[in-house]
Image (cartoon, rainbow, N blue to C red):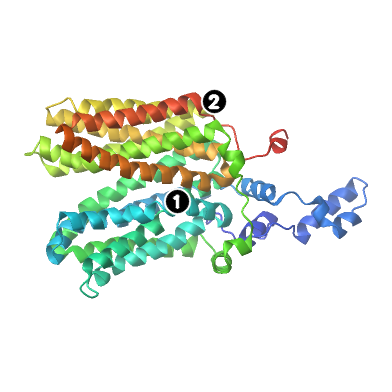
Amino acid sequence: MGRGPKSGDTSWEGQTEAAGTDTWTWAALSGREAEGRAQGHCCAHVVLSPNLMQPPPDETRRDAAENVQWSRPECQVWTGTLLLGTCLLYCARVTMPVCTVAMSQDFGWNKKEAGIVLSSFFWGYCLTQVMGGHLGDRIGGEKVILLSATTWGSITMATPLLAHLGSAHLVSMVFSRVLMGLLQGVYFPALTSLLSQRVRESERAFTYSTVGAGSQFGMLVTGAVGSLLLDWCGWQSVFYFSGGLTLLWVCYVYRYLLSEKDLILTLGVLAQGLSMARPSKVPWRLLFRKPSVWAVICSQLSSACSFFILLSWLPTFFKETFPHSKGWIFNVVPWLVAIPASLFSGFLSDHLISQGYTTIVVRKLMQVMGLGLSSVFALCLGHTSSFLKAVVFASASIGLQTFNHSGISVNIQDLAPSCAGFLFGVANTAGALAGVVGVCLGGYLIEATGSWTCVFNLVAVISILGLGTFLVFGQAQRVDLSPAREDL
């Protein structure tokens, strides 16, 4: 078994991508010259004037990216590694919510101040989505993920120290959470860029849904282990735990999956500035003229908004509607259901494609489950007085939403594999912003009407709008190629 797609290889594609240059190497010229001689042509003019025969830089990068897909063993290693990385991402992300009550008691925070600390994560998270995807497209998603994980792991471990620096505890914690959001905001766009370039189309849905299941694993790990550490060793130990595991994961990836030369080249490019290294070639106008692009953005916006509303308000709904219920049941069971649901959606999607169903039909079927059927169960939540039924409906709604991993999340990779990270960053930024607005609107509706039914109605309306847009305008053909390239 190989170590994964290490970038220290000597192939022309590997040199071109790692060095961040679009010029041909002499090895590539020599290959073309030999080919020309075999056909009886003189190649002196090729050697003397390579620019005359050089393809456009953006098309060169696309062709190179298509030729470095992972082998099956490499894909398995990277899938497991990224699954663990996503798990640790969420471990670090939800560490603060787990510790908020204990920290509020230590530092004297009221509910408003605690809310400021918790919400400050999304202030940074919304700002780096596009940048993370763009960086992933240009220097490699695995490098962006590794560099960001190194930093967010270090910040997580240093949080207890930052909290006790001076008397401005609130300011230091808000600063650390904003910084966490900035660093973690690049993860999923860079992940999308990486998988779109390295995973075969027939395996993308299962790979992405498997990696995406790490988010549920992360929340379960921090919810279970973090709660024990909180009771036994204090809130500081939870930060040490999640931050330390992240740094161990970084060491593993650096030691076994990436080369030192690769990272040095990447750091050199970042130090010089991306504008100095290579001009941007994202086909902005080409992408945003396509209805299918806007369809996937709207669907991602709806998916993220409905998920954030449920994630934010379900615990409060259960506490107020069923005050004598066990908190661990409604905080754990939906995420336990979501893990196998995510894995099954990926398997089902790839299986249907292998059986001859067209890609777009499968993607739309996944969205019918992820946005359509999940909204039906969300509606049922507002019309039940049984705790058991409410847990079943909540688990079904959350579980079915994971089908979005095999629908719109992979459809972005179908549409624009050469700049999937950038496009996912745009869509996820819109989704994150819509989620913040949706959560606030949900709170307003609860205060204004005194009823939880309107919140779940809001989730259903948002989901159906996104689903309808995708069903009408969604496509799976590439849109990141010029018309001339599409005809080839």
Is 340 situated above or below 279?
A: above
Q: Which mark is residue 302?
A: none
Q: Residue 282 in the image: x percent, y percent?
A: 60, 48
Query: Mark 2: which secondary structure?
Result: loop
Is 345 situated above or below 198?
A: above
Which of marks 2 and 1 precedes in the sequence? 1
Residue 87: tell me if it is visible: yes
10 Å crowding of disc 1: few (<14), some (14-19), many (20+): many
Is 288 situated above or below 258?
A: above
10 Å crowding of disc 2: few (<14), some (14-19), many (20+): few
Name the residue type under label 1: Gln
Name the residue at 26% across, 42% down: 440
Name the residue at 26% across, 52% down: 221
Name the residue at 46% across, 37% down: 297
Q: Residue furthest left?
A: 324
Callout in the foreground (1, 2): 1
Q: CA distance from mark 1 to mark 2?
A: 30 Å
Query: Mark 1: which secondary structure?
Result: helix
Tell me if 427 is positioned left or right of 336 in this view. Answer: right
Q: Quadrant of residue 316?
A: top left
Q: Which residue is mark 1?
A: 129
Is 389 situated above or below 30?
A: above
Tell me if 8 is positioned left or right of 388 in this view. Answer: right
Name the residue at 22% across, 70% down: 168
Residue 333: tell me if it is visible: no
Residue 300 or 112: which is nearer the viewer? 112
Name the residue type under label 2: Thr
Q: Residue 349 in the image: x percent, y percent?
A: 45, 31
Q: Residue 299 in the image: x percent, y percent?
A: 43, 34
Q: Which residue is mark 2?
A: 358
Q: Residue furthest front?
A: 448
Q: Residue 78 in the image: x percent, y percent?
A: 47, 51
